[in-house]
Image: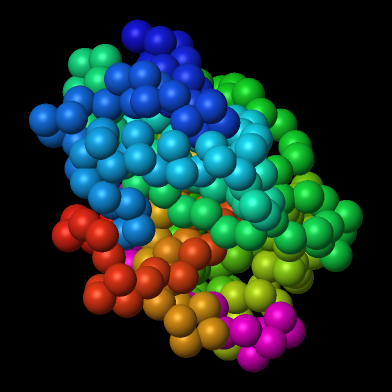
Amino acid sequence: MTSKRKDRIRTLLKGIETGDAAAVEVVNPDKYIQHNPQTHEGSEGLAALFKRLSKSSPRVNIVRAFEDGDYVIAHTEYDFASSKIGFEVFRFEDDLAVEHWDNIQPRQGLNPSGHTMVDGPTEATDLDRTDFNRETVRSFADEVLINGRFEKLEQFIDDERYIQHDPRIADGLQGLRSALEPASDTGVAMQYDQIHRVLAEGNFVLSVSEGSLGGVHSAFYDLFRLAEGKLVEHWDTIEAIPPRSDWKNDNGKF
């Protein structure tokens, strides 16, 4: 069932290229809950979205796919009218998707250490450490990202191996510290307020959080790779949450 669910999500997302309404057959139309504020509810909303996007001759690449219980996570590259990077999260009941969240931002160039937003390992390992790694990231997000206990960064980050894929930040502990501390060298204040979800498969863990970037209400999706109990690699997307008046469904971003 694990590979079947991942394969069905790959088929669904590749349907964006063709606009084929049949691609959304993985969705249970009677139960589907849509959390993208700019997409209408149900499988019919997805079919209409795919048809519209297909007119721009899009390209979709699923870089990574993971599974945690009833959740499938896809790390994606989209080339629509412009190039974007996204995370897609689907919740399943049996073999059908019944709920969807995402976080998408424009692709940016190489970061200060020469990494793209998506390069690096793609396959999960250390499956026996899934629960331990999930709780490690949950603790990191709570203590450091939410509560600002930056003196604990060394407990969670392997400074010598930490690879950064955020386009604004360099590798290593100092690059992360500079981005997170209030007097940020990036020039943009980043505030994490609430953790909504932490999903894991093996050495890959995705945290979904809410906060603000430069004072703008935003969603943070942070994917970490762990080794020997510490965070050694990080990818992310940050997306502004549109005002409530612009939403096309009533389910909320999270």
Q: Nearer the viewer, residue 35 or 153?
A: 35
Q: Nearer the viewer, residue 232 or 112?
A: 112
> What segment is highlighted magenta in the picture?
183-197
Which residue extends farthest front? Answer: 55
Quick one: quadrant of the C terminus? bottom left
Which residue extends farthest bottom? Answer: 183
At 60% across and 65% down in the image, what residue appears? 153
The answer to whether residue 188 is magenta is: yes
- The image shows residue 128, relative to residue 1, as above or below, that is below
At 78% across and 50% down in the image, what residue appears? 116
At 71% across and 81% down in the image, what residue appears? 186
Residue 158 visible, this orientation: no
At 45% across and 11% down in the image, what residue appears? 3
Residue 25 visible, this orientation: yes
Locate residue 250: give its quadrant: bottom left
Could you tell me residue 167's position as x and y percent?
73, 62
Locate residue 92: give its quadrant: top left
Quick one: quadrant of the N terminus? top left
Could you tell me residue 142's position as x and y percent?
39, 63
Horizontally, is 114 left or right of 172 in the view?
right
Could you tell me residue 8's position as x and y percent?
41, 18
Which residue extends farthest left? Answer: 30
